[in-house]
Image (spheres, grey):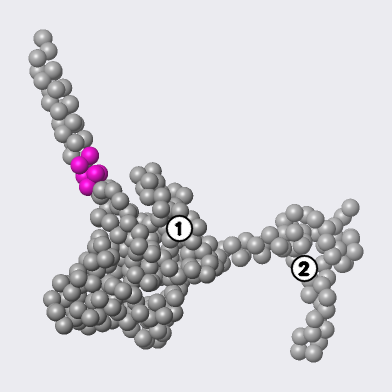
Amino acid sequence: MDKKTNSSKISYCPICNRSFDTKLEPIKVLGINITPKKRLCEQCSNKKNLEVIHNENKLKILELQKKSNIPKFFYNTDITNISLQWKWQTKIINFIKNWSPNYSNNWRLPFLFGVSGTGKTLMSYCLINKAIKEYQIDAAILDIASLIANNKETDTNSYGKFGIQNINLLIIDSFGCHRINPWILDTLYTIIDNRLKKQLPTMITSNVDPTAIGKYFLELAGNVNLKHICSALEDRIFELCLLMKLNGTSIRLEKALKSIKDDKQSNTDYNLQWITKKNLPN
């Protein structure tokens, strides 16, 4: 049957070649009745809409990841594809796997502590990627210096008019690794206290034992008059976060030692080859 000789109400989808009724219900535009026409059949139209939605979601996820301060190299990192050397950190992996912003207690995130190189920052990337990809909520990971810099209440702030302290999910990385002064300590206390009052999900990573945070910050600030605020900060962290220790030794150190060992073995093999070749009979 010739498609063009068919009824004017019937058309053929240019994608799948299905026949379908072209006309839709009339609509009024500036008081005039207009009958719009479908360009695709219902199946292809739905598929096209899904593709548009999918692409829009991908763009939104990418935008949130750029804003989150995650290095681009880790955009696809999650608990399902991390290397086997981290799989034994089961406690934090299970926590991330089961976490959802819809849970009543979702705002209590871990205070991850342990020696350097045990995967604290990597696990933070996994949690942020889950929050962004599965729930499309805004999240950020910042050290103390960046946290203070992004806490300005301005219209041009990349984290909104009220700064970083009201972002849906915040991770403070390398807590206790930066020099502080009374003003930074006061600002840090304000951010932590604000997030606790509003029950906003907040995760902290640190090399310092959380039970010694107050004393540690007091030593960093070098001012005995700050004892009260250091103690209050430590106390609020205990309520804001779940204490979770990552055991083990530094993966970075293990890799470095293995590299040295491999280099030594490589040099030994080379020397043996050289000696063997030198002593070969003519």
> Which residue occupies the foreground of this view, 231 or 200?
231
Q: Residue at x 10, y 9 (%)?
A: 282
Specify start and end residues of the magenta stretch as a single range.
Answer: 253-258
User: Where residue 169 appears, x then y in whole percent?
Assistant: 43, 70
Asked whether the viewer can see residue 66, the reply is no
The kind of secondary structure the magenta stretch mainly shows is helix
**Does residue 11 sit above or below 236 in this rendering?**
above
Disc number at residue 38? 2
Q: Does 34 appear above or below 216?
A: below
Q: Do the CB atoms of the residues marked 2 and 1 lie less than 8 Å apart?
A: no
Residue farthest along the bottom direction in this orientation: 31
Question: Callout 1 environment at 10 Å: few (<14), some (14 to 19), or many (20+)?
Answer: many
| Rendering coords of residue 93 (x, y %) | 43, 53
Q: Position of residue 180 (x, y in %)?
A: 19, 75
Which disc number belongs to residue 96?
Answer: 1
The residue lying at 12 percent from left, 13 percent from top is: 280
- Give the left or right position of residue 148, taking residue 46 as reference: left
Residue at the spot x=38%, y=57% of the render?
Answer: 123
State the SS at label 2: loop
Measured from the top left, where is residue 145 in percent x and y? 26, 73
Q: CA distance from mark 2 to mark 1?
A: 45 Å
Along the horizontal axis of the image, is 97 left or right of 246? right
- Quick check: is 63 in the magenta stretch? no
Q: Amino acid at mark 2?
A: Lys
Secondary structure, mark 1, is helix
Location of residue 7 (image quadrant): bottom right
Residue sitting at x 76%, y 62%: 42
Is residue 254 rendered magenta in the image? yes
Quarter where residue 174 is shown: bottom left
Question: Which of 166 and 270 lies nearest the eye of the viewer?
Answer: 166
Residue 95 lies in quadrant: bottom left
